[in-house]
Amino acid sequence: MPDAQAAVTNRQTWAEPGYAERGDPESGCDLRQLRHHTKNVLQQMLLQIADAQGLRTSVCSSWLLADLQRRIRLSAEISDALFGLTRSPAPMSERLQALTESMIRMLADGTQTIRLEVTVAGECPEPLRQLVLRVAHEFLGNAVKHGMRTRVTGTITVHLATDIDGRTALVVTDDGWGFDGSLNAGDGLKIAGDLAASAGGTVSLHRTHVTVASLELPAPRAKRGLG
């Protein structure tokens, strides 16, 4: 199947659906997103090991093992949140807060200080909640891996809003390095675009002095043509 394509105009990227346009997006997206998540964790582990190669002390070895264990545990928690709840779901505000905190702790360098602000307005429709969390996972991964790469400090904001008609928007903003000149959407943005298309929504990435990743979803009833 062809990859999604991204068109950039005035530093704005739109993720066009690939798998989603065939009407069966989640069958392809599930494994792609799990693979992408796993790759992110392993990349961070390799970076930690590379940073410690020149140090042979037992203190360094102990710290490295503890850090790798911590990241593996966080990865398992994130996978549970995305693909298999093991207990009754918490309110959406708590689930989004927990996911975003875990993503930053898992992917950020130990020397970084990344401030996180999460706000939720309105009641996200139940059929859209897992999709929103999965797209948030991709947006946060990009913000930490790319926007905050080699930065000492930075801020990531996450805002989820649902209006009275059930239309839902997720916006993730970071003040990282911003536009890198690439004309193509990465794996994370492609996955997010396919997930959005499965619910009749869209994903875009706008880069200026900050990077803004946006998800727009119609109300579930509107998608089914029931009103």
Image (cartoon, rainbow, N blue to C red):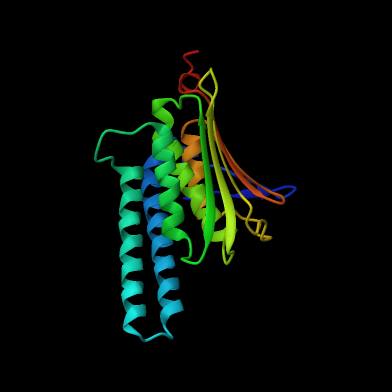
Horizontal placement of 192 versus 180: left or right? Answer: left
Confirm whether residue 109 shows in the render. Answer: yes
From the viewer's perspective, tell me whether residue 111 is left or right of residue 205.
Answer: left
Q: Where is residue 134 in the image (x, y as percent from the top left)?
A: 43, 43
Name the residue rendered at 54%, 49% in the picture: 4
Is residue 176 depicted above or below 28 in this figure?
Answer: below
Q: In this view, does 164 lie to the left or right of 39?
A: right
- Residue 189 drawn above or below residue 170: below
Residue drawn at x 62%, y 56% as measured from the top left:
176
Q: Where is residue 3 in the image (x, y as percent from the top left)?
A: 52, 52
Q: Where is residue 164 in the image (x, y as percent from the top left)?
A: 53, 18
Residue lying furthest front in this view?
59
Q: Can residue 18 be seen in this view?
A: no
Identify the residue at the far right of this view: 10
**Front residue (pair 34, 184):** 34
The part of the image, by quadrant, that contains residue 106 is bottom left
